[in-house]
Amino acid sequence: MTKLHRLLLALLTITLLATACASDAETSEETTTSESEPATDETADPADTGFVYADPFGVFELDPSSAFGTENILLQNVYETLTYFNPPGSDELLSPGLAESWSSSDDSLTWTFNLREGVTFHDGSPLDAAAVIASLQRTIDLDLGAAFILLPVVEMTAIDDLTVEFALEWPTPLDLAMSSNYGAYIMGPDAVTQDADWFNAGNANGTGPYTISSYSPAESTVLTQFEDYWGGWDDGQITEVEIQLVEDPVLAEQMVRNGDADYTYNLPFDSYTALEGEEAVSVVRGQSMTNLFGMLNHERLSPEMREALVLSFPYDDIVTSLYGGEATRAQGIIPQAVWGSSPDLDLPETDLDRAAELVAAAGADGSSITYSFDAGTTEQQQIGEVWKANLATIGIDLVLEPLTFDARLELAQSDPANAQDIFTMFWFPTIVSPYDFMFSLFHSEDAPFFNLGYYSNEDFDFAIDDADALTATDRDAAIALFQEAQQILLDDHAAVFMVDVPDVAVIASDIDGHVQNPAYANVVRFHNLTRG
Amino acid sequence: MTTTIRSNPGFLRRSLFGEPGSARWRYRKSPLGLLAAGVIALFSLGALLAPWLTPYADQGRGTPDLPSRLQGPSTSHWLGTDDLGRDVLARLLFGARTALIVAIGVVVIAVVVGVLVGAIAGYFGRWVDEVLMRITDTFLAFPPLLLAVIVAAALGANLRNTIIAIAVSWWPWYARQVRSQVLSLRERPFVQAVQAIGVPDHQIIVRHVIPNAMAPVWVQATADLGAAVLTAAGLSFVGLGPRPPTADWGVMIADGRQLVLSGQWWVAGFAGIAITLTALAFNLMGDVIRDVTDPKANGRA
């Protein structure tokens, strides 16, 4: 009978998963309180200055020159950049960071940044022009991650201790590049000479308000207040932060509901509606700078088939039903909250009759189309299933292929002619500029990197390259060119532009001071927070 | 036929319940066994007749109905609807098809491969036995579920690969079982007699050895049908099951699990109940069959 007992045990485990999750959450509460005393059960205590961030993806790389993933949630609190991109709706595009002011020559080929006085790194050494140059030079030399933001830089000169001058090879809005989510961090002189292993052992030396006091990437990272931070400290500010890796959205939701975590994101969209009614948490929303689209394989799909796919996509159903009203339909490749987006483009509407005619004209009735998507990402799968039902009515079988992103990328990059027909992907900006989206995803490439529809159009390439060069000198002209380029993509049926993905998160309702800024996806600036 | 029955009043009873004292007769006397058989019959009928049992057959196959997302159980949707508005009962019925295909596929492959390997190893002995059994041991060295996960991940997720993945980790158990039977069978006079008159080895194995080694295999296979349903649900729960939108119980639990916190328990809940009942029924049936066929357990069932 022992076999029967084992079986019963296994069954219990599966059917009672929800309960299992609840007990997991309790266990993690114990660890939390013993390690860092953020003391969620001591909310009555006014001196509670701890904060727990339930992180769905983890912080696995700490080298500020090369990190190019979800590590930004930590790096943005330990290191700083010369400028910051303001949340959408602000009067100015940028605010000062380590640079108090900046200017450029008329041709945008020379840029001067005046550094803030009295800033020190975590080890006590002062911030000066030499440190800025050494940091950016390290990023340029390593040439990893987001180093491309510094591509136009040919020379950096220290005019004096607190003034840096950049000479560029072609005109670029360098102030925008310096606000980048990745690759623009300034680090202390002793860190510049270190390699990635030193950083990944949990070492850091930035100017930000927090230092890393313990780091175990698969579990949790603890940040502690840097007392000499130039921005200063007031009573009630958050002095200790624990970033816990919580990959399971069900567990993360449990934790914020129980007060075991103060912030999380990446929950299923249906959860947010239910969480609105909870007193202990607030649902926070930013304008979306992340979008979801399906790049259409130009090596495999005829123009008729691409148009048929574009016309068969259930745009309105997806937005109204699957996202519970949180999302808006994508208006081309540039999310609406990114400057340079346009509400005036000629967008396609779902038209199954026309799509059926196109399929018949292409003689493709009865054929199969593959839809490559991220395994485990509910929204991509659901979209695939709804689209599949539409395509079935016009004689096309959409085959859903879930794989990990790395595996999908490798397949897509290796052999376009035998790769997927549709590559589904999220994109959020490195630098908040239309060029970031258009260059990475649709500019002609010798070997495919992120242009995974293998799109190539000279007119488009010229338009966006010119627009980028104009961004620094004549932004209106640049915007007009970007819009022209967007219409080219739509007319060519380069991709199916699905939705601007909602920027939604959950934060404990007794926390004040958080602003959801989509330019820095999922970053919480802990120094701005107080617990009320 | 009717005359036969009339002239032989015990025929109908005996053909249904078996000869008194026979294994089948004792099985029918076991309430647990009958209950298990009932559940399995229900499960199989549901799977076979799925398209005719529900008005939502299209949804069972995967067509979404977005306007009716996440409705609780009602008269129009007895078990509610899922996050794409599909009828949960229809998904369960079509999911039973997936479960049945996987369970039968896995057990058939594992039995065929395992029995052949075990019989050849046991019959020929010596180095053939050594080689085949060491290969078998290699497979046994891996925890079965882990091996299945590795194989499924390597082959890619779809229904066929799920079946292969589980079968790969299960055949060695049958091989060992059959080998131990054959080791004693080949010393028995009837085998030695056919060897003596020059019947070729492959005929001896197929006609004389394997049929006599099968009794414990059937018991094992019945219980394994349930375990196959459970393992397949586990694989698809972690994303290594059939491709969406194929209905699958493990996928229903994985998807529905996220909805439980928001109060929408019915997707994961009913799929969990279906898995529990089916796996339990097959396992009980296997247990009862073992008890009634075990000569030492005579009368105890």
Image: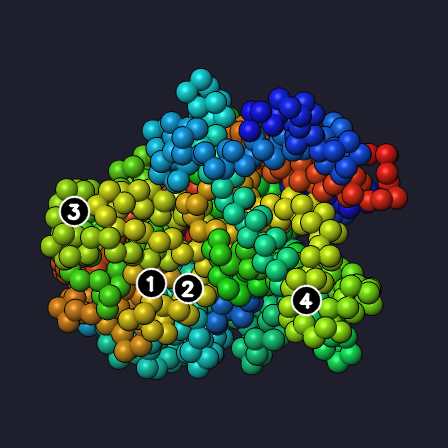
Dots 2 and 1: beta carbons under 8 Å? yes
Crowd rating for badge 4 (residues with CA inside 10 Å; few <14, some 14–19, many 20+): many
- Comparing marks 2 and 4, which lies closer to the viewer? 4
Please, which chain is the residue tagged with disc 3 on? A
Distance from label 2 to label 1 (Cα)? Answer: 9 Å
Dots 4 and 3: beta carbons under 8 Å? no
Residue B88, position as x, y percentages in the image? 47, 31
| Residue that label 3 marks | A356
Q: Is residue A346 left or right of residue B140?
A: left
Residue A325 visible here:
no
Distance from label 4 to label 3 (Cα)? Answer: 59 Å
Residue extending farthest right: B296
Please, which chain is the residue tagged with disc 2 on? A
Q: Secondary structure at mark 3?
A: helix
Dots 3 and 1: beta carbons under 8 Å? no
Dots 1 and 4: beta carbons under 8 Å? no
Please, which chain is the residue tagged with disc 4 on? B
Crowd rating for badge 2 (residues with CA inside 10 Å; few <14, some 14–19, many 20+): many
Location of the C terminus of chain A (image quadrant): top right
| Residue that label 2 marks | A408
Q: Secondary structure at mark 2?
A: helix
- Comparing marks 1 and 4, which lies closer to the viewer? 4
| Residue that label 1 marks | A420
Amino acid at circle 3: Ala
Mark toward the start of the polypeptide (3 vs 1): 3
Q: Is residue B265 above or below residue A449?
A: above
